[in-house]
Structure formats: structure tokens, C-alpha cells
Amino acid sequence: MQVKFGAIIVDGSGKVGGHVITRNHYGKAMRTKVTPAQPHSSAQQIVKARMTAAAQAWRGLNSGVREAFASLAANVSRTNAFGDVSRLSGFALFMRLNRNLSEAGGTPLTTCPVQPVSQSVLTLTLAAAAGTPNVTLGGTASDTPTAFTLIMQFTPQISAGIAYANSKFRTLAHQVGAATITYDGTTSYPAKFGTLVAGNKIFARAKLVHTTSGFSSGWVQVSTVVTA
């Protein structure tokens, strides 16, 4: 569990006892901890195998390369559950970059990369219809990110009243090196998530991954209600 102290505790995140502190539309809330089902799907097993291989690869690096990652990590920040900025360790950065490369279909790192000039997703729009089935994702990215791969993730259809779906995203498509985002999921979305139903909500998000270094932009997220 993470706790942020003030005169008295002012914020918290994580697990304590049999409860989990989480965030919803109204702010922080506490709920009973539930152990999620582990489907042991082929996709899940592939991700686990890749992360295990990356951890083993870190142990195989020489001390100079590990020190280079530690130096690079000192210049890379992350935002924690409270919105505070913190720094990564060399190992954490190595694992993060290799996870991004795995998502983007890149080659695992064996040396410390140079941090690239950042690129980002600027706009993102999502549309879905059930009558004549249609799912499209469009938008723009900064400049022409030829050295970047765009990763696009979608959620299954959920209730239109749900505002957060962070645990439900699954990678559905990639797009390499284009400033204009164009993806037609009319066939691939129902194949993965089932027939479209009017009134349900779909979330989508996208980010850019530099295919040599593994550095990525932040996610940009959108949602839409499936029309009739």
C-alpha cells in the first residue's frame, strides 16, 4: 500500500488488510479486495514469458551497461498514484523500455539507448455502430513519427454508465510511422470482443513507441457509445 502523509494521512493507494483503496468518479474509495481470475490465456502467458526474459537479460548485462541505464533513469520521471513525480531505477527503466518494445514488435535492448525527441498523439476520435457494423479510430500524431509505432488498444463493450475501464484494455492494432491515424476495426473488433450492441460503450486509447529505444508517449484515451 502507498500512503501520503500530511498532518494526518491525506491520501492512499493500494491494498491494506482485506481492502483496496481505489479511485472512482467521486474520488478515493475503499472496497473489499477480490482476487481476480487468472485465465492463463495464451496472450497472458506470452507477456509473462517476455517479462521473465527481460529480467533475465538484465542480470546478463555487464556493470557498465547497467550503470548507463541508471544514469539515463535519473533523467526519466514518472508520476505516482498521488500525482507526485518520482524517478525510476535503472532496472525499472530497462523493464519498461523492453515492455514497450515487446508491445510494438521491436527488438529487446542489450545496450543503453539514447532518449529520442518525443512524439505524441495529438487527437483521437472513435466511432462505432451496430446496425451496419462499424468501428473506426482516427486522429493525428505530432510531425511524421517515422521511427515510431502507434499502439491502439480497445475495451470490450461495457455499460454506458461506466467512466473508467483501465483494466479492460487489450491491444488490437499497430500502425507504423504515420502522422495521420486511420484504423478500421469493423472486422477485427467483433472478432475479438463480440457483436456490437447499440447503447454499449467502447473505450480506445493510443500511444507512440519509439521502435529502437522503447521510449513512449503517454496514452490518449477516448470513448463512444455504440449507435444503432
Image: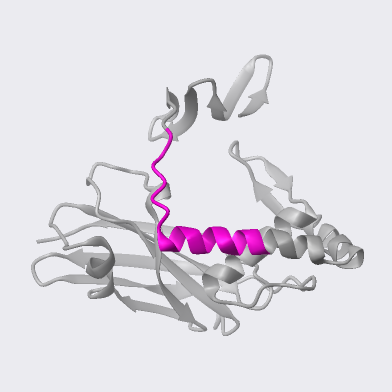
Q: Is residue 93 left or right of residue 45?
A: right
Q: Is residue 142 left or right of residue 156?
A: right
> Which quadrant would residue 171 be assigned to in this image?
bottom left
Q: Is residue 216 left or right of residue 113?
A: left
The residue sitting at the top extreme is 8
Q: How many marks?
A: 0
User: Residue 158, image x and y in percent?
Assistant: 25, 49
Residue 29 visible in rendering: yes
Please tell me whether residue 38 belongs to the stretch shown in magenta.
yes
> Which quadrant would residue 70 be assigned to in this image?
bottom right
Q: Residue at x 40, y 60 (%)?
A: 170
Q: 159 or 138: nearer the eye? A: 159
Q: Residue at x 23, y 74 (%)?
A: 186
**Range shown magenta:** 35-53
Locate the N terminus by quadrant: top right
Locate the C terminus by quadrant: bottom left
Q: How is the structure coloured here?
A: one colour
Q: 142 or 5: nearer the eye? A: 5
By secondary structure, the bulk of the magenta-drawn segment is best described as helix
Q: Residue at x 48, y 68 (%)?
A: 122
**Position above or below: 162 against 228:** above
**Position above or below: 144 against 28:** below
The residue sitting at the right extreme is 64
Q: Residue at x 59, y 64 (%)?
A: 50
Q: 18 or 92: nearer the eye? A: 18
Residue 142 visible in rendering: no
User: Residue 225, image x and y in percent?
Assistant: 21, 55
User: Residue 203, image x and y in percent?
Assistant: 33, 56
Please tell me whether residue 84 belongs to the stretch shown in magenta.
no
